[in-house]
Image (cartoon, helix red, strand yellow):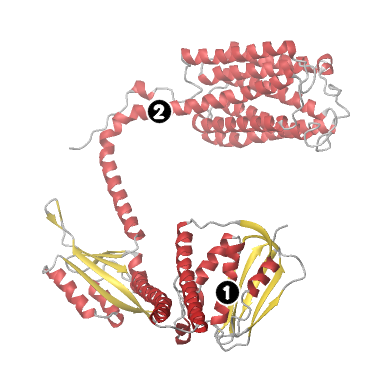
């Protein structure tokens, strides 16, 4: 069935959609007059104590000006946006008034004494700030009077060309007026009459300037009230804002001096004045949007249903496409003839051969055959899938890529039926299992390493214990055998400690007992424990300066022992090992240098990987679990340091780590 579209009635089409021509409801009128009454009550309550001086808050005035400027500029934006639609001349005048009020606050705060400097910036004099206040609080109501006149005598819409010009001319005029007022207040400081002394507003009143500003604000307020009478939502709330502005001027004049109770309240009322029209326009925009949605929702529901379904279909397609592109697997969809319908980018990344939509999958597969192990078996399985002999296949194959083999898993399935309609498509999923294979190999190697490392000390312990139990041995040999048992037990304990440390570090449960210690003394004590235990000479180099660090003494000793132990084991033919401590950029650097086997370039990226051991016959004889450097890295980083190394294969290795110095 074709959806029908109902045309809105003429009455609905005449429904007001602008804030300037919608008649306010009774509730809105009560809210506006309620706010005006609250402003009057606040001002009346403040007047008796208005001259009472309150503490001077230096940050208050910049914050107040910032709020005023933001509120006024938001109002300007909303009014100009409405003007672009309605093209009514009064609205652009009102936008110019709010823009003038927003911009003039900038020179006013810059010239205000005591805010940014004692006398104000921009070369201001003692009268500059107060005259800018006069131009602000006198100019804004004058522009409101201009708005009233425009509403009375020029309320029609202008042409689009004129509207475009006014969008530029009125803001430029506001900027020009602000610039003229600022220049007059700053350059004319010595010419304009004195209207304030030591922050006291008495002269502002007695000079007649203050009463004139007050009268202009009263005139603007009465004009809005009596001429426009709150006929629209905009004029109603503009009248309330004008009244709050009028009470701001009233309290300022009768507050007596700056930073009095009345002066502070006047600034708060100014904020209320600046925010009323903006707040109502935002609420009105929300209400108008809701009403318009409600009005057209029924008319468009049926006609939008098909569009919504199409949009949903496109979204589903895009979602599926994004999902297929974001998977770790390579995916290829082919039709019953073998033509590629879809292929994601991951497929090319895995196999290293690009495939395009419209290409036959066999053409793509032929490019892989030279590098694919057991390609014939895989192709035979795919043929069985296409012929219908199999509903799905699951094969593994190795692919030569970049000098190494990638272990791939191929899973292909015939896509089923949907609503009793057979698709006949085939989906091929390619998964890179290389990392899993490497992890399996590493696990097997790890089990072998652990078995060997555990069996060796246990075999030795068992052998010597059986020897001691089965025969009488001389006391000196007995002590020697027991020493060997103790040595192997210690080795076994250290191995288990490494495993436990690794488990705690991976679980995030490793505990550190940090304390301040002298690194030089700690290194020297640790090195002393190695005296006579190794064939190489251990040389120690310490700086003259103190090296205070915050560290866990036991864990730091563990790091040093591991590094020294590695240096001893991997430099069997060397005559010395150098251990150095030096200072660099607020850090202590500890270096352990051996002159032994060195590290091959291909092994360097993996040196701090858990369970990694260099695949070298000489090193295999040395043994080890491949955990020491990984544990060192975790400990050093937990201390806020870094660990690294430099090595030349066949010439030796220097491992180093840093610790932050304590002040």
Which of these two is toward me, 348 or 81? 348
Image quarter (top left, top right, bottom left or bottom right) of the N terminus? top left
Residue under label 2: 290
Q: Based on the displayed image, in which of its 4 quarters is residue 321 positioned?
A: bottom left
- Left or right of 1: which side holds 289? right
Residue 128 position (above or below residue 506): above
Q: Is residue 119 above or below residue 237?
A: below
The spot of residue 224 in percent (x, y) is 60, 15
Tag 1's secondary structure? helix
Q: Position of residue 486 (x, y in %)?
A: 49, 74
Q: Nearer the viewer, residue 53 or 136?
A: 53
* Residue 257 left/right relative to 567: right
User: In x, y percent, where is residue 199?
Assistant: 82, 23
Q: Can you identify the residue that label 1 sits on?
A: 563
Q: Residue at x 16, y 73 (%)?
A: 383
- Quarter of the rendering occupied by the C terminus: bottom right
**Observer able to see residue 322:** yes
Residue 381, image x, y percentages: 17, 73
Number of other residues with Cα within 10 Å of mark 1, as a class: few under 14, some 14 to 19, many 20 or more: many
Q: Nearer the viewer, residue 272 or 50?
A: 50
Q: Residue, x 15% and y 69% (percent of image)?
A: 386
């Amino acid at each position: 069935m074709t959806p029908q579209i109902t045309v809105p009635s003429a009455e609905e089409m005449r429904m007001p959609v602008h804030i300037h021509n919608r008649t306010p409801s009774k509730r809105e009128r009560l809210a506006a007059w309620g706010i005006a009454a609250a402003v009057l009550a606040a001002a009346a309550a403040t007047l008796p104590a208005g001259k009472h001086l309150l503490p001077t808050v230096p940050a208050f005035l910049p914050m107040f000006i910032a709020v005023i400027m933001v509120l006024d500029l938001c109002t300007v934006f909303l009014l100009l946006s409405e003007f672009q639609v309605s093209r009514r001349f009064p609205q652009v005048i009102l936008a110019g008034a709010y823009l003038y009020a927003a911009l003039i606050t900038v020179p006013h705060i810059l010239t205000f004494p005591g805010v940014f400097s004692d006398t104000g910036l921009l070369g201001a004099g003692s009268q500059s700030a107060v005259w800018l206040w006069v131009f602000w609080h006198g100019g804004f109501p004058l522009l409101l009077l201009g708005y009233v006149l425009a509403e009375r005598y020029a309320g029609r819409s202008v042409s689009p060309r004129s509207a475009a010009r006014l969008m530029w001319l009125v803001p430029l005029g506001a900027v020009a007026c602000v610039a003229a007022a600022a220049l007059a207040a700053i350059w004319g400081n010595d010419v304009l009459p004195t209207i304030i002394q030591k922050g006291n507003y008495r002269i502002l009143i007695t000079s007649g300037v203050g009463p004139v500003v007050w009268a202009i604000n009263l005139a603007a307020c009465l004009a809005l009230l009596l001429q426009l009478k709150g006929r629209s939502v905009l004029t109603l709330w503009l009248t309330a804002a004008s009244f709050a502005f009028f009470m701001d001027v009233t309290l300022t004049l009768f507050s007596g001096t700056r930073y009095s109770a009345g002066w502070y309240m006047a600034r708060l009322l100014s904020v209320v004045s600046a925010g009323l029209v903006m707040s109502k326009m935002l609420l009105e925009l929300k209400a108008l949007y809701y009403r318009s949605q409600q009005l057209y929702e029924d008319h468009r529901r049926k006609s939008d249903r098909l569009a919504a379904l199409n949009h949903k279909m496109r979204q589903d397609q895009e979602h599926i496409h994004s999902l297929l592109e974001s998977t770790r697997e390579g995916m290829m969809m082919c039709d019953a003839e073998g033509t590629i319908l879809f292929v994601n980018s991951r497929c090319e990344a895995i196999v290293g051969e690009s495939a395009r939509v419209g290409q036959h999958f066999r053409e793509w597969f032929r490019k892989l055959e030279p590098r694919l192990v057991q390609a014939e078996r895989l192709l035979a399985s795919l043929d069985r899938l296409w012929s219908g002999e199999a509903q799905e296949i699951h094969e593994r194959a190795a692919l030569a890529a970049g000098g190494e083999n990638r272990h791939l898993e191929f899973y292909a399935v015939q896509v089923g039926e949907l609503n009793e309609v057979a698709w006949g498509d085939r989906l091929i999923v390619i998964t890179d299992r290389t990392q899993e294979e490497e992890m399996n190999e590493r696990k097997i190697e790890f089990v072998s390493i652990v078995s060997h490392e555990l069996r060796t000390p246990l075999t030795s312990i068992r052998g010597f214990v059986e020897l001691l139990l089965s025969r009488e041995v001389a006391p000196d040999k007995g002590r020697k055998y027991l020493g060997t048992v103790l040595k192997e037990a210690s080795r076994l304990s250290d191995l288990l400690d490494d495993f436990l440390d690794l488990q705690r570090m991976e679980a995030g449960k490793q505990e550190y007992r940090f304390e301040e210690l002298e690194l030089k003394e700690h290194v020297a004590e640790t090195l002393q424990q190695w005296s006579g235990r190794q064939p190489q000479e251990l040389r120690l180099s310490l700086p003259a300066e103190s090296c205070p660090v915050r560290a866990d003494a036991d864990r730091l000793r563990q790091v040093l022992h591991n590094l020294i132990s590695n240096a001893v084991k991997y430099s069997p033919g060397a005559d010395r090992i150098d251990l150095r401590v030096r200072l660099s950029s607020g850090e202590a650097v500890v270096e352990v240098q051996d002159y032994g086997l060195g590290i091959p370039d291909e092994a360097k990226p993996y040196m701090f990987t858990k369970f990694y051991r260099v695949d070298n016959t000489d090193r295999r004889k040395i043994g080890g679990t491949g955990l020491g450097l990984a544990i060192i890295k975790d400990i050093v980083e937990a201390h806020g340091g870094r660990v690294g190394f430099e090595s030349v294969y066949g010439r030796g290795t220097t491992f180093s780590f840093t610790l932050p110095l304590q002040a």
